[in-house]
Image: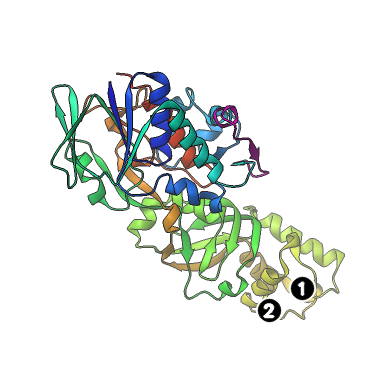
Amino acid sequence: MKVAIVGGGAAGFFAAIAAKENFPEAQVSILEKSQKLLSKVKVSGGGRCNVTNGCDGIDELSKAYPRGGRQLRKAFGRFDNKDTQNWFEKRGVPLVIQDDNCVFPKSQNSQSIIDCFMSEASRLGVDIETGVKIDRIQPENGKLRLEIENQSENRVYDKVIVATGGSPKLSGLRWLEELGHQIAEPVPSLFTFNMPEESIKQLMGIVIEETLVSVQGTKLKSDGPLLITHWGMSGPAVLKLSAFGARVLSEKGYDFTIQVNWVNEQNVEAVRSELLGIIKLSPNKTIANYRPYALKERLWHFLIDKSGLSSKMTWSQLGKKNINKLVEQLTNDVYKVKGKTTFKEEFVTCGGVDLSCVDFKTMQSKVVDNLYFAGEVLDIDGITGGYNFQAAWTTGFIAGKLSN
């Protein structure tokens, strides 16, 4: 049996290794169009490679996917995040789980993961070719013929697994559309918010651990840490919001307004009570010198200024009207977003092969026999925290079974 894996990234290597383990006698070849293998693995997690997430249970795991969570839920029953950790540990790559549940190699170096894949591929006898770009796949007598750019000779395989990763443009998926697959148009996911007109950028570098961020005029909201940057806002709360709102925010042309709740407390009266409590306990302290919710000093001073109040006022001097201003600033602070910034090396797309075209029990195409899919080429994407790699491992593992 001849098997081609189109794409030498995370999903491609995992699928190739699985295929060769399941069918030792098969000829398994990885065909990568560029000269680089595992390039996204190399740069992910700041060069450390966040291989998966350490969360407990398939329920929690599947909730991390704005698209594909329902389909992955069943797939995770066959290979989940715990299986991923065991897979690497058994192959000599010790892992560590951080406090935020992100799982990294103990070496804190993505090269450990790359070395593991290259070693396994070599041990099993997986063929690897770079500079091989597939122009077209043609079904032919139950087999699949691959037309290769700048090569007159076509190659015929019994099985083909497409693991080409996310494509930022629809044109990169035309060859799969031509086979009869529906394609969900790609748009960016996991991006940061640009705020060219907002002065909060002067607080760059500050992280606020507990926030709630929502997009005005939508039901989109997300909580978690928020990072203020020199271009706007980032951090898990913003990245999660961008993932779940990928299509909506694209339709808005990345021009929208967000509301930030700096204390992640939706009960406005509870926040008012917190401020009134300060007045009782420390009436003579200036508002600048007593920070509610242990807010970062620079942020608190910024919010006081934004409220139009003097930082020299004492808490007892505030009065009801000014208390209301501070409550509003803490729970419903408004910022204008104009544009986005994506991490080009680590870009994640919303879009790809429509999931209705794929049987998730086998990862085989419902349109073309003996054609399988794995990884981000599918309309699957997760929030930040190791989830996108987990989807790659799971779909690659199942595709590598080459089941009909």
- On screen, 281 above or below 62? below
Foreground: 323 or 40? 40
The verdict on residue 89 being magenta is: yes
Residues at circles 1 and 2 in contact by the CB criterion of under 8 Å: yes
Cα–Cα span, label 1 and label 2? 9 Å
Disc assigned to residue 287 = 1
Residue beneath disc 2: 309
Task: Give the residue type at disc 1.
Answer: Ile
Colouring convention used in this rendered image of the protein: rainbow
- Label 1 CA crowd tier, 10 Å (few <14, some 14–19, many 20+): many
Task: Specify the quadrant that holds the C terminus.
Answer: top left
Task: Give the residue type at disc 2.
Answer: Leu
Foreground: 163 or 312? 163
Percent coordinates x, y for residue 46 in the rendering: 55, 54
Percent coordinates x, y for residue 361 in the rendering: 37, 22
Percent coordinates x, y for residue 388 in the rendering: 46, 41
Task: Specify the quadrant that holds the N terminus.
Answer: top left
Residue located 43% across and 22% down the image: 21
| Magenta region | 87-101
- The answer to whether residue 72 is visible is no
Residue located 62% across and 71% down the image: 203
Upstream in the sequence, badge 1 or badge 2?
1
Foreground: 269 or 401? 401
- On screen, 297 above or below 38? below
- The answer to whether residue 43 is visible is yes
